[in-house]
Amino acid sequence: MKRIVLPVLALISLTASALLSAHADEPATKDSLPNNSHVEQPDSWTHHPILNLFSRHEEKGMISGEDPVKEEPSDIFLQIWTGTGGIAQQKLFSFSDRTTIAGNRNDAEWWFSWKTGQNAAFAIWQASRLPFPETIDNWAHPEGLISSDHLITQYGLGNRKLFNISISQLIDRADASERPANEIVYIRVIALDQEGKPVGNPSNTVEAHFVTSDK
């Protein structure tokens, strides 16, 4: 039996070698290449986190022709000093989105805290008697604007920067005798490029509530 099987196997091997050598010099064509599209991939491949990551990126970014999603720069975050603590008392140095300023503190410097991820040449602050519009249209001269100036950082506190504004800059255009007992001044920060154009969106708005004081 072994004498019959061995010659048969040898013949099969020689035939296969001859066929391979006959096609070795032929250029590969689409029909001659193996097509595995009908072969189902195992579930372990389909749900593999790494393989899926690359396939989804190619499908969304290359096949569909869509541009990769660009992350927008983070907005400016602004806070106003609550009136407690100070540079020398950092544990009590607190900030919020609004504060009350009594009349007997009108000559004081008031602190503000800000941080941003925007890459800007410089920034300005603005103070207004009216809430700022949601858009940046007419950003340089919004209705109700009291004053505006370059933002100069005085100190750093962790990932925040501190600057101050003289209270007189917030009320110097208002006649104290005609001011209502309670007046709200709205403050915001705008980052600008070297051409003086806004970079991204303005900061959130903080509120300074001025009240009269007989003390």
Image (cartoon, grey):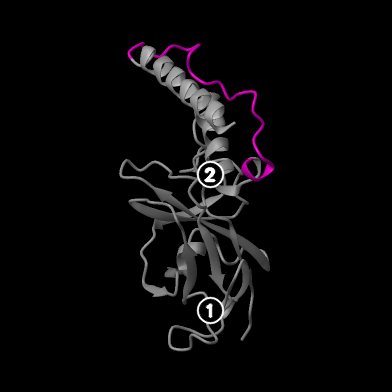
Quarter-wise, where is residue 150 in the image?
bottom left
Say whether disc 2 or disc 1 marks the residue closer to the N-terminus: 1
Contact between labelled residues 1 and 2, with CB atoms less than 8 Å apart? no
Position above or below: 192 against 150: above
Q: Indicate the position of residue 167 as horizontal and vertical percent values.
A: 48, 69
> Could you tell me if residue 160 is visible in this image?
yes
Residue 68 position (above or below residue 78): above
Dividing the image into 4 quarters, which one contains the C terminus?
bottom right
Q: Nearer the viewer, residue 42 or 171?
A: 42
Kind of element beneath mark 1: helix
> Which residue is under mark 1?
105
Judge left or right: residue 161 versus residue 63: left
Q: Which residue is depicted at the point 69% across and 42% down?
A: 43
Comparing 21 with 1, the one in front is 1
Residue 157 image point, x, y percent: 43, 75
What secondary structure is found at the residue carrying circle 2?
loop
**Rendered residue at 66%/40% (across/down):** 42
Could you say which disc has been placed on residue 142 in the image?
Answer: 2
The residues colored magenta run 25-45
Q: Nearer the viewer, residue 182 or 67?
A: 67
Marks 2/1: CA–CA distance: 27 Å
Residue 92 among those drawn in magenta: no
- At x 47% / y 63%, what residue is drawn? 115
Instruction: Find residue 15 and report its horizontal and vertical position in percent.
Output: 45, 17
Point out residue 118 in the picture as x, y percentages from the top left corner. Answer: 43, 52
Judged by its main secondary structure, the magenta piece is: loop
Q: Tell me if mark 2 has few (under 14), some (14-19) or many (20+) residues whose alpha carbon lies within 10 angstroms of its own.
A: some
Query: In the picture provided, is 32 more to the left or to the right than 152?
Result: right
Q: Nearer the viewer, mark 2 or mark 1?
A: 2
